[in-house]
Image: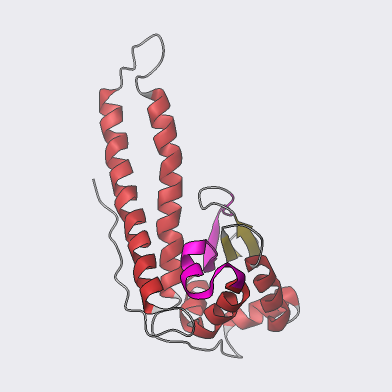
Amino acid sequence: MKKFEEKKYDIPELKGISKKTIEEHLKLYSGYVKHSNLILEKIAELKKEADPSSPLGPGNAYALGEINRRFGFEYNGMRNHEVYFDSLQDGAKPLGEKSQLKKKIAETWGSFETWLAEFKAIALTRGIGWAMLYYDHQEGRLLTAWIDEQHLGQLQDCLLLLGLDMWEHSYVADYQPSGKKNYVDDFFANLNWDTVSARITKA
């Protein structure tokens, strides 16, 4: 079975977000990759042990159901973090005035500033989760969303362009719980918009 491979990141010095926080956060990402692979292996094992001729249905049905649910959490956690860390690589780069993404944002929200204020407000939603900017393939439009847990609520058939991790592990060590707004501001100060823009260009 083909395994998911962990990406390696060399995140530069960031404004506000410490190297220690990034190191610990990358360990969490590594865990998502590891557990995505382990769950696929376990699913294969459970299927081999299943007895489809049983009058109660295939063996291990409950175990398979639960572990398949868990796979969505681990897999989406892996992919969300790849978008997050990709966006912090190679230093901060502004969003070009003539970029396709900036034009699309202005077309959808009226201006980049209006979108940014809305996105930051979404990020400051109470609780843990992710603030997301998606590209909807079917409609050719941009959408923002708050995702409580990564295996629930992610938008179907949409490409994740920008993901801001608002789980406490991403900011509390540097900002304390009361510093959430400062973390959000610093995330955008550190953001490599070239990487974000490249995603919509590929789409």
Residue 26 versus residue 46 in the image, above or below: below
Q: Is the N terminus in the top left, top right, bottom left or bottom right quadrant?
A: top left
Residue 120 shown left or right of residue 29 in the figure: right
Question: Number of numbered discs present?
Answer: 0
Residue 149 versus residue 81 in the image, above or below: above
Residue 125 shown left or right of residue 16 in the figure: right
Whether residue 169 appears in magenta in the rendering, the answer is yes
Whether residue 88 appears in magenta in the rendering, the answer is no
Q: Position of residue 172 (x, y in %)?
A: 51, 68
Q: Quadrant of residue 112?
A: bottom right
Name the foreground residue: 179 vs 33. 179
Name the foreground residue: 189 vs 2. 189
- How does the figure colour the protein chain or chains? secondary structure
Q: Position of residue 152 (x, y in %)?
A: 56, 47
Q: Which residues are magenta?
A: 153-178
| Extreme residue in the top direction | 55
Residue 50 shown left or right of residue 168 in the figure: left
Q: Position of residue 113 (x, y in %)?
A: 70, 83
Residue at x 34% of width, y 19% of height: 59
Residue 56 shown left or right of residue 147 in the figure: left
Residue at x 53% of width, y 78% of height: 187
Residue at x 46% of width, y 76% of height: 87
Q: Position of residue 124 (x, y in %)?
A: 65, 67
Q: Quadrant of residue 7?
A: bottom left
| Extreme residue in the left direction | 1
Residue at x 33% of width, y 42% of height: 39
Residue 154 versus residue 39 in the image, above or below: below
